Image (cartoon, rainbow, N blue to C red):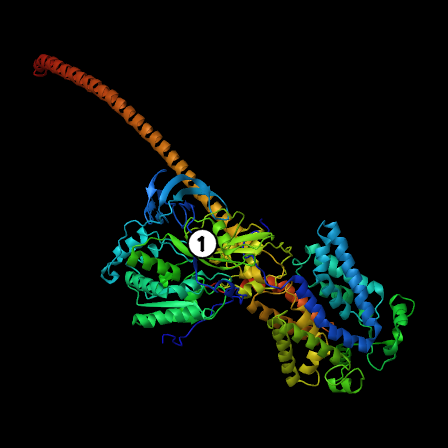
Amino acid sequence: MKSLISSPYTHGSSSLQQVMMQVVFALIPAIGVYFALFGWGILTNIVLSIIFCLGFETIIMWLRRRPIKSALFDGSALVTAILLAITIPPLSPWWIIFIGSLAAIVFAKQLYGGLGFNPFNPAMVGFVVLLISFPKEMTQWLAPIGAEGNGMGLLHSLQIVFGSTGIDALSGATPLDVIKTGIRMGETINTIIAGNPTFGQLSGSGWEWINLAILIGGIWMLWRKTIRWQVPVAMLGSLAAIASLFYLIDPEHYASPLFHLFGGGAFLGAFFIATDPVSGATSTKGRIIFGIGAGLLTYIIRSWGGFPDGIAFSILLMNMAAPMIDYYTQPKVFGQKG
Amino acid sequence: MNKINRKLWKYHGGLHLEEHKSISTGQQSALLPLPKRLTIPMQQHIGEAAHPIVDVGDKVLKGEMIAEASGKVSAPIHAPTSGTIVEIAALPVPHPSELNVLTIVLESDGQDQWCERYPIENYRHASSEQLRERIHDAGIVGLGGAGFPSYIKLNPGQHFAIETLILNGAECEPYITCDDQLMRERPEAILNGARIMRHALHAKRCIIAIEDNKPDAFSALNNALSQSGQNDIELVMVPTLYPTGGERQLIKVLTGKEPPSQGRTLDIGIICHNVATAAAVADAIIDGTPLISRIVTITGEAISTPQNIIAPVGAPIEELLDFAGRESGVNTQLIMGGPMMGVSLSNTNLPIVKTSNCFLLQPAEPTKPESPCIRCGECARVCPAELLPQQLYWHSRAKEFEKVQEYNLFDCIECGCCSWVCPSNIPLVHYYRFAKTEVWAQEREKEGANIARRRHEFRLERQEKVEREKAERMRKKKAMLKDKEGAKDDTAKKAAIQAAMDRAKAKREANQVDSTISASDSQPKSEL
């Protein structure tokens, strides 16, 4: 019988599904902390996002006459859904998540040919589309811990998500947002931080815990070899390096490197987004360049750009450069080094 | 005593695979009961098929040559036992294409009676040419799997000084243990073969490399080396890693040098032979025995007693499988070679050939479906040739064969590491094989087209030449005609001129007379 076409007739244990599920597992600590801080809002985000993303995946695969089951179970749409959900403010209305999922799965992923063919990270495309189109909704983060929203029940949360109650009274800005606005108003970093309960030990109060949880998940993925070290190390390293440089020159107007690492989406970007192999560079050297580029662009956008955080934009910009980076960083073939 | 702590190098990539080797090394190699019928294909090596020199009905003795080499890259074939030639016909061979190849069928007479053999008394007194000739005549080909005629690899030519002869005893592929078993059972033959080859090559040194998962083989060789009282061969344990048994990878591990891409190991002064080839060389020179049998590993989850079997070339695979015992009631898949680089055979009624090192009988497993490539880069991380397998895959799939070659398709050794790690379960090597055959086909086509083009151009040129010559001839002929005519004209002209001149002269003379007359007439007048 010819069940296998040609050698090798044996295969290692790794599978696409396994890789994707490891990414999902690595996000669990962060989701736990989110839940503790923001309550049901994060879970409604995730559930809605999964429903919409898998729904869109199914519809498009059906329209493309491709096998639906294998696409749904490879886990890639699930990863996109969860990553998108945790970048959207908790308790966001359902249609925000619907549009984000549409942009991520239909436009960024399937219209380019589905898994493996998308030049841009789908979750980041979804996030950026929302950020640009609905800046008000996308910057309305709940004030974590101690704020009134914390004790909100599931029912109340659902009422907010599906539009019968507003949340204006409960919302606040992210730490990076506060810093950016403060600097624009001519304040110094110290006065901004001193006068605002948003800030905690390392960065924003609460945010530092979420980022710590993401860091733990990232390190677990490194240990499991789900991801390789090059991208996260290069990205966080370059971000810390350039932040240190400006912090040393002018600590009044530039936040500390620690704040840059723990303040925004640096860990999420470095471990979970920039390591997306489909849209990133693949060679070892290429991945280091990709990471450095993403780190530097993040700092530039945060410090001098129009948006408080630059992770999504910097990764999407580096996604564009990935094919060229790969082309110029090809390793020398065995026997051609001499 | 020869276990020197020698510096070893690492090559890029490679895999730690489950070995599955111990299941077949529990017992001594068994001798296969002599089969009644041996089907002996004429193509058991790389190069031209051998040419039969016997006819149906001929009686042959064991070891007698039954087919001669045809051309330089070819090997003769010998009768594995005594008996009668009963058929010479195109029959299926163990090859993935399952094409038929000209085959001699020998019916054994059960006597197993040897022909006259001519050993070389002392190889040290023999010249390289003599040794090579004998190795060629014994039909020895690379027994590691490739089957390249060995005598060619013992003839580096005058321009290459051979620094190192490496005997490859790495045997890195899972399940296969025939070399391991041979090293344990016949270490002297391997050492003697090594010495003969070294003598033929004038190599400065000789290394036998063994993966460190074969300590018994190592100590057997080590003991034999001590007993021989010579310390002329270096035994080296190399770390177990797939595919260290690849010639290029092994050279890198032992010397730190990389044979040039698409070049030969000869270019860096190294020649590599398999340990089993060395033993065959020793048999050919010291005993005068041609290559007519080999050790074959019969193993796998569907074999009751996995083991190594000494079997004559041409023995049916089926008899070897039955000898080791098949698990009943399982749907099985037969693989010739190892699980990483072997070929799948759909028929057990095929003969074993000189290069058959292992037959693996596994329960058939359904193939896992192929998912899209997510460019994770694991394939590049494990590739021992340092290629970019996913780029190769991408371009092979798109049938961009020029691009595939730019990404060094032909440096791929088809070890299968990339396919093994691929989380999307893409049969990458299959795509590369496809691309290689396509490129070869295109080249042949191009070559064919080139020949046609050259032929056409030659024809045009010839036609042109004929035309030109014709025109030339015409021109010459015309010119000649013209010349003749011209010549005629000339004489006429000359004649006319002459005539005119004559006439003029005559006139002049006449005038003169006239004038004389008139002068005479007038003179008196003037004097008047």
- Residue drawn at x 48%, y 50% is B319
Residue denoted by label 1: B356
Does any portion of residue B161 appear in the rendered image?
Answer: no
The front one of A335 and B507 is A335
Q: Secondary structure at mark 1?
A: loop
Looking at this view, is B483 or A81 the one in front? A81
Q: Where in the figure is residue A27, as x and y percent of width and height?
A: 72, 72
Query: In the rendered view, would you say B351 is above or below B483?
Result: below
Specify whether residue A294 is in view.
Answer: yes
Q: Which residue sits at x=17%, y=18%? A: B498
User: In the rendered structure, which amino acid carries the disc numbered 1?
Assistant: Ser
Picture coordinates of residue B235, whole percent (x, y) = 38, 70
Q: Is residue B148 left or right of residue A206?
A: left
Q: Quadrant of residue A205?
A: bottom right
Give the letter of the chain under mark 1. B
**Residue A118 higher or lower than A172, as above or below:** above
Tell whether B368 sits left or right of A186.
Answer: left
- Of residues B104 and B494, which is closer to you in this image? B104
Residue located at (69% from left, 56% from top): A114
Most extreme residue toward the front, as rendered?
A: B111
* Quarter holding residue B203: bottom left
The C terminus of chain A lies in quadrant: bottom left
